[in-house]
């Protein structure tokens, strides 16, 4: 077994609970190539699972208690299965416990209690879905140990349900879908209305490109106000325009939207409508011309999030502009916004130049030190041991 973090998770489980885990399951974080805030508008997204993963070492217990512990904190959280709810759990433990609860909600029954230990190399708060990675690793483990036979899309929905109902973050389905459906060197082109998905080859290596993550280290939380208020604007826009979701509008509807909506709501709607189109265009360009052709679409997405959706911050704008100035093919902030990371699609030979330039610019501007590293597209959730 060559996966060191899986072995470490198993060893930590044994040290914590005094017996061997029955297995270790893992799930990746994700980066979103394009399609931001479109998921809860029933639109299109194009994320990929990354080679940073969360590991859950898990065993069934003989009673109905659940214990969770992790490398994130020294505490062991213990709760009776039937007592899991939004009030009884909080902090990082709400993610794994929320999943256990959501499997019960979906299937109508409880399996036996569980001991869970979580280890991860997905950076937290970087916009790389460390939360979905926890949810999906625990979801595949519980699905197997409780014999619930749920499919990957159901497990993605279970992760989202945990996050919405127990953690209290009104997030969409993109992150869990990427973590469940990801494939090596492919992006997941997902229609968030019905979760139909297609794997799209990224072709980065063949084109001599890599995706650089520029984590600003400015932490964001989607259970705080900004994300929810963007979501509320989108719902208002859809209701005023008389559609079920903003997915049902196209660019041809924007003139009418401009007449009917107040300025802020109009700009929120314009972001979603144009972003859906950019996802479709990106998939078409990747398939026809390869990844060097998608730079303008990535930057168009960034500008739209900065100006219309207003979820970027100075650090993210600086990361994007500096990477582009130093030769990145395209760059944009990624994830929910208000902090987190930008991505820069960068020719391999200038990775270190771009890295040094962004670091230097952050220092000059007095920003905190960014964490910059390359990622590749990796497979989705799986049992490892
Ligand atoms: C967060 C949410 C996702 C999605 C993105 C924005 O990552 O968890 O559901 O809404 O923000 O695209």
Image (tube, rainbow, N blue to C red):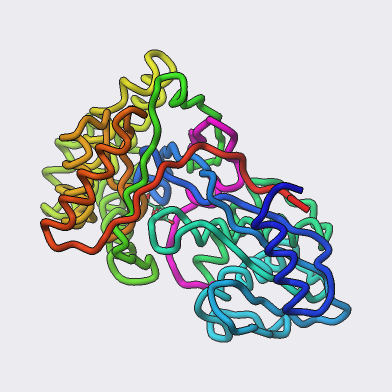
Query: Residue 303 falls in which quadrant of the image?
Result: top left
Query: Considering depth in this image, is 298 or 84 the residue closer to the camera?
Result: 298
Residue 168 is covered by the magenta coloring? yes
Q: Does residue 224 lie above or below 360 as drawn?
A: below
Q: Which residue occupies the extreme right position in the image?
A: 62
Q: For the image shown, how many numbered marks are present on the structure?
A: 0
Q: Is residue 102 visible?
A: yes
Query: Residue 281 falls in which quadrant of the image?
Result: top left
- Is residue 365 toward the left or the right of residue 192 in the image? left
Q: Position of residue 330 (x, y in %)?
A: 27, 32
Q: Does residue 343 lie above or below 173 as drawn?
A: above
Q: Is residue 304 visible?
A: no
User: Which span of residues is magenta-colored?
Assistant: 166-191
| Residue found 24% across the figure and 45% down from its top | 356
Q: Position of residue 32 (x, y in %)?
A: 41, 43
- Is residue 258 toward the left or the right of residue 93 in the image? left
Q: Which residue occupies the extreme top position in the image?
A: 288
């Amino acid at each position: 077994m060559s996966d060191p973090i899986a072995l470490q998770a198993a060893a930590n489980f044994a040290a914590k609970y005094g017996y061997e885990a029955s297995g270790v399951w893992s799930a990746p974080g994700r980066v979103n190539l394009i399609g931001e805030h479109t998921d809860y508008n029933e639109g299109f997204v194009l994320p990929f699972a990354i080679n940073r993963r969360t590991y859950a070492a898990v065993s069934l217990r003989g009673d109905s208690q659940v214990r969770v512990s992790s490398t994130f904190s020294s505490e062991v959280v213990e709760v009776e299965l039937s007592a899991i709810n939004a009030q009884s759990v909080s902090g990082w433990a709400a993610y794994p416990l929320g999943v256990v609860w959501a499997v019960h909600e979906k299937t109508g029954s409880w399996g036996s209690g569980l001991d869970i230990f979580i280890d991860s190399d997905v950076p937290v708060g970087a916009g790389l879905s460390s939360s979905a990675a926890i949810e999906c690793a625990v979801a595949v483990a519980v699905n197997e140990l409780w014999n619930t036979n749920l499919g990957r899309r159901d497990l993605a929905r279970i992760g989202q349900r945990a996050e919405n109902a127990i953690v209290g973050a009104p997030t969409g389905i993109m992150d869990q879908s990427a973590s469940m459906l990801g494939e090596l060197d492919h992006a997941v082109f997902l229609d968030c209305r019905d979760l139909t998905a297609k794997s799209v080859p990224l072709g980065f290596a063949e084109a001599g490109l890599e995706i650089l993550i520029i984590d600003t280290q400015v932490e964001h939380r989607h259970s705080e106000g900004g994300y929810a208020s963007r979501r509320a604007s989108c719902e208002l826009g859809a209701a005023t325009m008389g559609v079920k979701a903003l997915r049902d509008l196209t660019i041809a509807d924007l003139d009418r939207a401009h007449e009917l909506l107040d300025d802020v709501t109009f700009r929120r709607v314009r972001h979603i409508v144009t972003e859906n189109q950019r996802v479709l265009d990106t998939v078409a360009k990747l398939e026809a011309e390869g990844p060097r052709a998608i730079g303008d679409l990535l930057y168009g997405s960034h500008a739209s999030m900065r100006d219309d959706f207003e979820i970027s911050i100075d650090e993210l704008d600086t990361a994007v502009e500096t990477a582009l100035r130093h030769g990145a093919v395209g760059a944009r902030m990624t994830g929910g916004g208000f902090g987190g990371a930008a991505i820069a699609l960068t020719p391999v030979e200038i990775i270190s130049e771009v890295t040094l330039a962004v670091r230097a610019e952050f220092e000059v501007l007095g920003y905190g030190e960014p964490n910059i590293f390359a990622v590749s597209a990796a497979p989705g959730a799986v049992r490892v041991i």
